[in-house]
Image (spheres, helix red, strand yellow):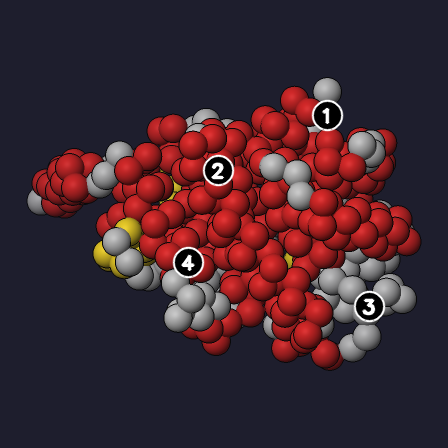
Amino acid sequence: MVAAIVVATIAWWSSLSLVVDAWRPPREELADGLQTALTRRWNAQELDPSAIERARNPEWDFMSRTFLVLALANDALARPDVATANLEVIDRVLERTLVEERDHGQRWFLLPYVDRAPFVDSSGRSVFVDGEIALMLAARNLVDPDESFSRELASRVELIEAQMRRGPLLSAESYPDEAWVFCNTTALVALRASDPVLGTDHQPFVDEWLAIARERLLDSKSGLLVSSFTHNGKILDGPEGSTLWMTTHNLLLLDPELARSQYEAGKEALVSGFAGFAWAGEWPSESPFADRQSLDVDSGGVIPLLDASAGSSGMLLLAAAAFDDDELLDALMRALELGAFPVEHGGGTEYAAAGVIGSTVALYALRVGPLWDRIQETSA
């Protein structure tokens, strides 16, 4: 009897994956639909593209801008005929972001606990904010150079490198006495992306950082990169999927060999699947956080039994796409279509359960590639 139920369940799920495939649009069509809905938020002057997301989480508002700019830059490089339209949106995002930072300070994009203590570094700056703004500026200039954005990029890069060099691990804080591998590898990518724009060479500094990371930031049990640590290098959080997958994507530009080893080890530790669907956990099984089935700003909701983290599964979309892991990407997309509730919005598509940030990550995953290629080509 039990065997029959198991067989029937497997057959039902397998049939469900076929049904999802039947209604799921091709990747390029889905990317176009997501892009239409997400850019409309910035094209329609009567709309405030950030209000809802900011109310939920200021980090999500900020990161959704970064992923949108990166997606549009990739699309502009892949399809020059849409470059002008994409640049208009990119410029609108950048201009608004820089104005808000000037008017409100970096805390505008950070969670309230930024005020719990002063930053250890004398600059009092967040590499989370500086790194993503620098990456957006570099991406924009790699599509089409702009003098004013280049000047802003040069200033931002100088701040980032100086702050990172003052850190004992060559890493800067995102929050007071809290450095994140996600943010520091993103900042390193921004430095590398700025090189062809500014005529500089940050590869030696990148190599220094990577050597320290291999020595100080690898978890002894899993071999995965940890997520966060203090300014002096005390580990705060071990490996987390929501950080790891973005980090592997960044490492593809910085150190492809380390990127591949971390991606494969991460899949082994965190990725699960069944009958054509896939998802990712947030913490490895040996992590002290593995049994924490509650909301977390990075993990999102964690579904018990399945150990499926919204944050980790969403960011895995990006990693799978970046590593050309088509089988896993398809399985993740099936799960997204089934569980994130795609809805029509503004003539395009968004995922209601994923919000703007999740929908934008999905768009970036579907566009990823040309920008990293451009950086490598122009830096060779």
What residue type is disc 1 on?
A: Ser
| Comparing labels 3 and 1, the label whose residue is closer to the camera | 1
Residue 121: numbered disc: none
Amino acid type, mark 4: Asn
Q: Is residue 15 visible?
A: yes
Question: 10 Å neighbourhood of mark 3: few (<14), some, or many (≥20)?
Answer: some
Q: CA distance from mark 3 to mark 1?
A: 31 Å
Residue 241 sits above or below residue 127 on the image: above
For label 4, count other residues whose C-alpha is less than 10 Å away and answer few (under 14), some (14-19) or many (20+). some
Q: Is residue 134 above or below residue 51?
A: above
Circle number at residue 43: 4
- Pinpoint residue 362: horizontal percent, then vertical percent: 41, 46
Which numbered tag is attached to residue 379? 1
Residue at mark 3: 124
Q: Nearer the viewer, residue 86 or 264?
A: 86
Question: What is the secondary structure assignment of the residue under circle 3?
Answer: loop
How far separated are the C-alphas under marks 2 and 3? 36 Å
Q: Is residue 77 left or right of residue 334?
A: right
Tell me the amino acid under the disc marked 2. Answer: Ala
Q: Secondary structure at mark 1?
A: helix
| Residue depicted at 68% across the width and 74% down the height | 103
Give the residue number, with chain letter if any, for mark 2: 83
Of marks 2 and 3, which one's residue comes earlier in the chain? 2
Q: Name the residue at 58% across, 36% down.
A: 143
Q: Residue 165, percent across and down?
A: 88, 49
Q: Residue at x 32, y 35 (%)?
A: 27
Percent across and percent down for residue 342 are: 26, 54
Mark pair 1, 2: CA separation: 22 Å
Q: Earlier in the sequence, mark 2 or mark 4?
A: 4
Q: Evaluate if marks 3 and 1 touch, with contact meaning CB atoms under 8 Å apart.
A: no
Q: Are marks 1 and 2 in contact (CB under 8 Å)?
A: no
Measured Cα–Cα span from mark 2 to mark 4: 15 Å
